[in-house]
């Protein structure tokens, strides 16, 4: 009975209707040769403005160690995720580090093919990276994984060398991560299925409106599925950290001091669980079409999609470039839906 109020006039006096459609996504089975690109973005606060120490170490040194352990625990999980079919050999794992204070201090990253991370290689990498095991290093060189080892060793050396610096600007960290993602991932893999998990580590700082806008831009651009904020120290603004976490579609862990061993293990397990949940999420793109309709315009016959998508709303959903695979009409493409 509402159709009379939803009618619209089309060219050549044809009639149409406004319709609302709800999309329920379901993860499709993956083809063995499909490629998925997963990115971990680590945005880390290296400001020295708080002057905070944990025991006898600067909080920045503790963040370096924490980020390294988090990175190695994810590496350790890769073979099991391959065996479970969560990751396939064609997949690509990108890690992006953005170190900021009042500007971007450093940017670096690693891109690794999942096919290169078999069980033996991962074990040798862990032994070589964590304890400088000469036998493991030699094995990696002999098996043709020397370049892979060099890239991981260089990234960890850069991370270990980060020291506290200037003031704090979350804006610089978020926009730096967005720009690096566009350059290193989006421009190379625009046509691939992409997911992103974000870690935002801070010891306190910026609580201005601009930082929330910058984080939202990052989320909208970088295919962010989930994120987490780790805040350490009395200088952390709890409201700011919580708002940033909500924008990243995740939660925040706040503490006055760096977690000790038992608590740190608990936090690592939680982080690994969130990370695996992100990996299990399948990006879905939807092409909207109802076939072709023909109508006679002044210049001759014109062909259109029988249904046009005027707007779409939902978490992360956005219009992609239209599909032009049909010779007579185009189809709207919605990107950012998730299943799994």
Image (cartoon, helix red, strand yellow):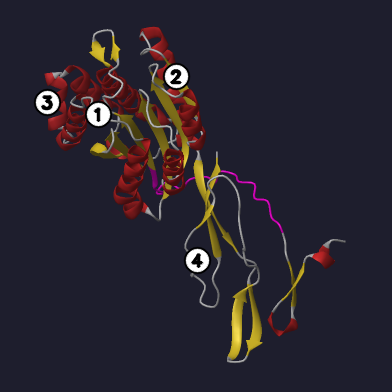
Q: Earlier in the sequence, mark 4 or mark 3?
A: 3
Q: In this view of the protein, which residue sits in the foreground, 156 or 140?
A: 156
The single residue placed furthest to the bottom in the displayed view is 299
Tell me the SS state at disc 1: helix
The numbered mark at residue 323 is: 4
Location of mark 1 (residue): 121
Location of mark 3 (residue): 138
| Front disc: 1 or 4 | 4
Tell me the SS state at disc 4: loop
| Front disc: 4 or 3 | 4
Q: Earlier in the sequence, mark 1 or mark 4?
A: 1
Q: Residue at x 88, y 61 (%)?
A: 1
Residue 17, position in %: x, y?
A: 75, 68
Q: Magenta-highlighted stretch: main secondary structure?
A: loop
Q: Quadrant of residue 36?
A: top left
Q: CA distance from mark 2 to mark 1?
A: 35 Å
The numbered mark at residue 250 is: none
Q: Residue at x 31, y 29 (%)?
A: 45
Location of mark 2 (residue): 254
Segment colored magenta: 20-37
Q: Earlier in the sequence, mark 2 or mark 1?
A: 1
Q: Is residue 33 magenta?
A: yes
């Amino acid at each position: 009975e509402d159709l009379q109020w939803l009618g619209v006039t089309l060219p050549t006096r044809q009639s149409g209707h406004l319709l609302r459609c709800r999309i329920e996504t379901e993860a499709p089975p993956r083809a063995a040769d499909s490629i998925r690109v997963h990115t971990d973005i680590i945005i880390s606060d290296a400001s020295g403005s708080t002057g905070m120490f944990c025991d006898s170490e600067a909080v920045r040194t503790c963040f370096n160690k924490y980020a390294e352990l988090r990175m190695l625990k994810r590496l350790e999980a890769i073979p099991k995720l391959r065996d479970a079919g969560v990751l396939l050999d064609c997949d690509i794992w990108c890690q992006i580090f953005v170190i900021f204070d009042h500007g971007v201090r450093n940017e670096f990253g690693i891109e690794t093919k999942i096919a290169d991370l078999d069980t033996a290689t991962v074990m040798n990498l862990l032994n070589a990276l964590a304890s400088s095991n000469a036998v493991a290093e030699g094995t990696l060189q002999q098996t043709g994984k020397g370049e892979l080892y060099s890239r991981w060793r260089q990234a960890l050396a850069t991370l270990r060398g980060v020291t506290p610096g200037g003031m704090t600007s979350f804006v610089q960290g978020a926009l730096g991560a967005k720009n690096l993602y566009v350059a290193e991932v989006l421009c190379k893999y625009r046509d691939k299925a992409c997911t992103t998990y974000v870690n935002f580590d801070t010891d306190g700082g910026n609580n201005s409106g601009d930082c929330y806008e910058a984080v939202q831009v990052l989320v909208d651009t970088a295919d962010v599925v989930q994120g987490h904020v780790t805040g350490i120290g009395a200088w952390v603004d709890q409201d700011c950290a919580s708002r940033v976490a909500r924008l990243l579609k995740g939660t925040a862990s706040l503490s006055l001091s760096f977690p000790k061993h038992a608590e740190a293990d608990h936090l690592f397990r939680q982080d690994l669980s969130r990370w695996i949940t992100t990996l299990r999420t399948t990006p879905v793109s939807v092409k909207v079409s109802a076939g072709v309709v023909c109508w006679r315009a002044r210049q001759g016959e014109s062909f259109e999609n029988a249904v046009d998508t005027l707007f779409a709303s939902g978490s992360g959903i956005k219009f992609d470039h239209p599909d032009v695979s049909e010779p007579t009409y185009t189809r709207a493409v919605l990107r950012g839906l998730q299943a799994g």
